[in-house]
Image: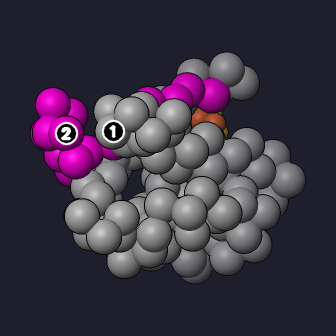
Amino acid sequence: MAYSDKVIDHYENPRNVGKLDAQDPDVGTGMVGAPACGDVMRLQIKVNEQGIIEDAKFKTYGCGSAIASSSLATEWMKGRSLEEAETIKNTQIAEELALPPVKIHCSVLAEDAIKAAVRDYKHKKGLV
Ligand code: FES
Ligand code: FES
């Protein structure tokens, strides 16, 4: 299967790979898995007092499209508010990366990871 140039770019030069301290009260961690293929994605955000995501990191054990989707997700989340980040849709990620139908679930994984990270942060802060 042919990967798009953008997938290959994110796969070869993933942005924001790494780990934030999950115990930090300002850090939200989202850990999700895809039942279809067993791939796992961890996405973390660090939020400042203004409610802006100042840092985002990911680690993905999975296919190229999942790595590219999470890399793109961290790029899109940085500098945005939690509310803005929550509106990121898997369809936007899939479109940006030109994912073929069989790889759509990889972008769903990224959307799920974003939502899980935001939820974890809000939970820590007593917002939900
Ligand atoms: Fe996910 Fe191959 S099916 S890595
Ligand atoms: Fe399953 Fe990409 S996340 S094949």
**Location of residue 59 (image quadrant):** top left
Task: Give the residue pinned by disc 2.
Answer: 25
Distance Cα–Cα, label 1 vs label 2: 8 Å
**Sequence-first disc among 1 and 2:** 2
Query: Which residue is rendered at x = 32% and y = 53% of the image?
Result: 45
Mark 1 is surrounded, within 10 Å at the Cα level, by few (under 14), some (14 to 19) or many (20 or more) other residues, namely: few
Q: What stretch is highlighted in magenta?
A: 18-34
Q: From the top left corner, tell me how far across and down residue 9 is, in percent.
A: 45, 75
Residue 60 can be seen in this image: no
Image position, residue 126 (x, y; %): 39, 34
- From the image, which quarter does the N terminus lie in? bottom right
> Left or right: where does residue 86 sit relative to residue 92?
left
Name the front one of labels 1 and 2.
1
Q: Report x, y in % for residue 43.
A: 39, 45
Q: Does the magenta stretch include residue 84?
A: no
| Amino acid type shown at disc 2 | Pro
In magenta segment, residue 20? yes
- Splitting the image into four quadrants, where does ligand 2 fall? top right
Residue 74 shows in this picture: yes
Ligand 2 has an atom within 8 Å of the beta carbon of the residue at disc 1:
no
**Callout 1 amino acid:** Lys
Residue at left offset 24%, top offset 64%: 49
In terms of secondary structure, where does tag 1 sit? loop
Residue sitting at x 19%, y 39%:
25
Provide the residue designation for mark 1: 125
CB atoms of marks 1 and 2 within 8 Å: yes
Q: How many marks overall?
A: 2
Element type at marker 2? Answer: loop
Query: Farthest residue in the right direction?
Result: 101
Looking at the image, residue 16 lies above or below residue 27: below
